[in-house]
Amino acid sequence: MNAAARAILERLFPAGLEDLRRRVEEVRLPARKKVFRRGDPCRNYLLVVEGSVRVQMLATNGREITLYRVRDGQSCVITTSCLISVEAYPAEGVTEVETTALVVPHAVFDQALGSSAEFRRFVFASQGQRLGDLIQRVEDVVFGRIDVRLARLLMTLSEQGARPIAATHQQLASELGSAREVISRQLKQFARREWVGLGRGAVEVKAPAALDELAQRRD
């Protein structure tokens, strides 16, 4: 087990809980690996040590939406909810890069909630924070202007160092919970204003100041 995973375990399962700690497994998953699928029973609590898991939903009409990402030191709010309610997954999780995670069996999860104050605080603090993020995500999708949301996404991706941004119109649509046609139309408007350049599977930000001004709008 790597040092980061060991440090997390020792913090969440302190002295006296070594038996529970030994039953937690470290896993290494390749990129684009399905961690869970919609309809799967929830048997384990997932805590990402290093990497990223994208949690997404696919509607019956084929549209896909990214709900959130689980990154270093974070847990999955849907997994926690499914464990507590003993329900199947309503969404799917896919690794975006090679990912190391801690897998806590359901029985250990239940025991740790009652035995470890540190684990209990972590679970419920994470749940509250991630649930707030998810509610904000829903509000953005339902009420947010698509041009503003697209500008924010392009600025975020650009600031992460992707120049040009390697993303298809469909991938951007999935991030924003929109249709590919809507995103393509909006990107063409940005291109006509010379804010972006469009290529095959790529978007180049040409006028970051203009995009950032639009991204800051709250109306």
Image: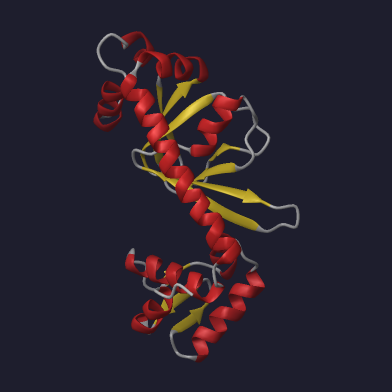
> Measuring 51% from the left and 31% from the top, which residue is drawn there?
80
For the image shown, how many numbered marks are present on the structure? 0
**Quadrant where the N terminus lies?**
top left
Q: Nearer the viewer, residue 192 or 197?
A: 192
Q: At which x and y percent is residue 202? A: 48, 73
Tell me which corner region of the image, top left, top right, bottom left or bottom right, holds residue 152. Answer: bottom left
Is 12 placed above or below 71 here? Answer: above
Coloration mode: secondary structure
Is 71 placed above or below 85 here? Answer: below
> Measuring 53% from the left and 41% from the top, which residue is drawn there?
33
Q: At which x and y percent is residue 89? A: 62, 35
Q: Residue furthest front?
A: 219
Work out whether residue 126 can be spotted. Answer: yes
Q: Residue furthest right?
A: 61
Tell me which corner region of the image, top left, top right, bottom left or bottom right, holds residue 163. Answer: bottom left
Q: At which x and y percent is residue 201? A: 52, 71
Is 115 placed above or below 206 here? Answer: above
Q: At which x and y percent is residue 91? A: 61, 42
Is 34 placed above or below 136 here? Answer: above
Work out whether residue 23 can be spotted. Answer: no
Q: Nearer the viewer, residue 147 or 95?
A: 147
> Measuring 51% from the left and 19% from the top, which residue is drawn there?
106
Instruction: Using residue 124 as the reference point, say whether residue 192 is left or right of it.
Output: right
> Measuring 65% from the left and 31% from the top, which residue is drawn there?
88
Instruction: Using residue 18 as the reference point, say whether residue 109 is left or right of it.
Output: right
Q: Nearer the viewer, residue 52 or 164?
A: 52
